[in-house]
Amino acid sequence: MITPSQPHSLRIFALALFLLVTDAQAMENPPLAMGQMVYVPVYSSVLYGNVNERGQAKEILLSAMLSVRNTDPVHGMTIQSVTYYDTHGTRLREYLNQPKALKPMGSADFFVEYRERSGGTGANFVVTWRAERPINQPIMETVHLFSWGAQSQSFISRGQVIRPAQENESPIKQP
């Protein structure tokens, strides 16, 4: 252990060594996966302003684009399902009729229209994907946008893995 009585240069060397080890750990490759189920938040609308006399806030409708990006430069992946749920967890629709292959570094987009109100403030996508071998985990984000004249709002929501994908898995079944 380095103490305050030791030379200043030795303390600086120890700090530099600590930072080098910490930096090397941060640069380690992220874990590989062969498939996952990913939850991606979607905001079909957002509330804003003050509540009115009925206790309701104003609402802005948003369009949303889900982007699924294969980050593996060598191996492809397959999107098994893209299911859209509303605020209450009710399944609204499945975006894929059949699995969709993504080449290395490829991407796919899925769109929720501006006029689509049924999702609400707590809507979400659940995306299930697989690969034949362990690959870099894909990035999944929704880009939300409102644009009217000179005004616009946009923001991004990042997906969260909720579990590894199971063999022959289909979208979540409603109880």
Image (tube, rainbow, N blue to C red):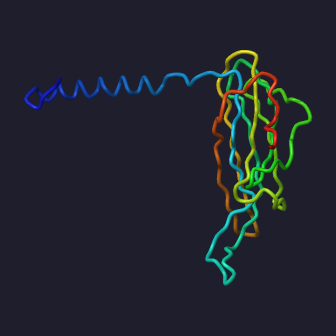
Residue 113: horizontal and vertical position, in percent?
Answer: 83, 56
Residue 159: horizontal and vertical position, in percent?
Answer: 66, 41
Residue at 84% across / 62% down in the picture? 115
Q: Residue furthest right?
A: 97
Q: Nearer the viewer, residue 32 or 155?
A: 32
Q: Quadrant of residue 168?
A: top right
Q: In the image, is residue 147 above or below residue 35?
A: below
Residue 97: horizontal and vertical position, in percent?
Answer: 92, 35
Q: Residue furthest top?
A: 133
Task: Left or right? Give the position of 46 relative to 2.
Answer: right
Quadrant that contains the C terminus: top right
Task: Left or right? Give the position of 116 relative to 159.
Answer: right
Q: Nearer the viewer, residue 78 or 7?
A: 78
Q: Residue furthest left?
A: 5
Q: Quadrant of residue 87?
A: bottom right
Residue at 11% across / 32% down in the picture? 4
Q: In the image, is residue 49 above or below residue 9?
A: below
Residue at 86% across / 41% down in the picture? 95
Residue 123: horizontal and vertical position, in percent?
Answer: 73, 52
Quadrant that contains the N terminus: top left
Q: Residue furthest bottom?
A: 53
Q: In the image, is residue 82 above or below residue 112?
A: above
